[in-house]
Amino acid sequence: MDTLIIGNQPLPERLAAIARAWQTSVPEAAARLDFESLDAAWSLLTAKRRAILRAMAGQGPLSIRAIARRVGGDVHAVHTDVRVLHRSGVIDRTEDGRMVLPYEVIRLDFTFTPKSAA
């Protein structure tokens, strides 16, 4: 999978998609990370973390220090942000401890309906 979709797909739809992929043995076209709200997504994707993702895009595995140099940030603060991104599944860790952004595309896909906007 080269695409990560970050959105707000309702849990029943998400579970149905997972079950469909399991039953048909056809993997989903993209990885997904769903939140209950856009605010919840922004709490993960802060400006500093988005800068980290941009700095990592297409670069292959990078050390925390290399990422910090690319974003012009403090190593400890970058380490904290990278750890949050890793725990959320947005970035991966290689066997040698470096971090890698495994996606070519990260797409935001949020649906607002009158019911969800209230």
Image: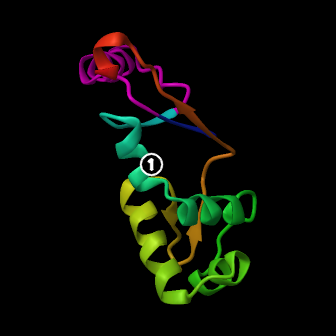
- Give how far across and how far down residue 88 sits, in percent: 38, 55
The kind of residue tagged 1 is Trp
Is residue 20 rendered to the left or right of residue 92?
A: left
Magenta residues, as a range?
7-30
> Residue placed at 41% from the left, 37% from the top?
38
Q: Is residue 8 magenta?
A: yes
Badge 1 marks a residue whose secondary structure is helix
Query: Is residue 35 visible to us here?
Result: yes
Please indicate whether residue 21 sits to the left or right of residue 90 in the image. Answer: left
Q: Is residue 59 above or below residue 28?
A: below
Query: Compared to 117, does 108 lie above or below?
Result: below
Q: Is residue 22 visible?
A: no
Instruction: Give neighbour class at mark 1: few <14, some 14-19, many 20+ (Cα, 10 Å).
Output: few
Q: Residue 13 appears in which quarter of the rendering? A: top left
Q: Which of the pair 80/92 is nearer the observer?
A: 80
Reading the image, the residue beneath label 1 is: 42
Question: Of all residues shown, which one is farthest toward the front?
Answer: 118
103 in the magenta segment: no
Q: Nearer the viewer, residue 21 or 30?
A: 30
Q: Residue at x 70, y 84 (%)?
A: 69
Which residue does the image show at 42% across and 77% down from the upper left? 80
State the image coordinates of residue 97 (x, y, percent, origin top left). 50, 79
**Screen quadrant of the C terminus:** top left
Q: Residue at x 69, y 81 (%)?
A: 72
Q: Quadrant of residue 53?
A: bottom right
In this rendering, the answer to whether 77 lies above or below 46 is below
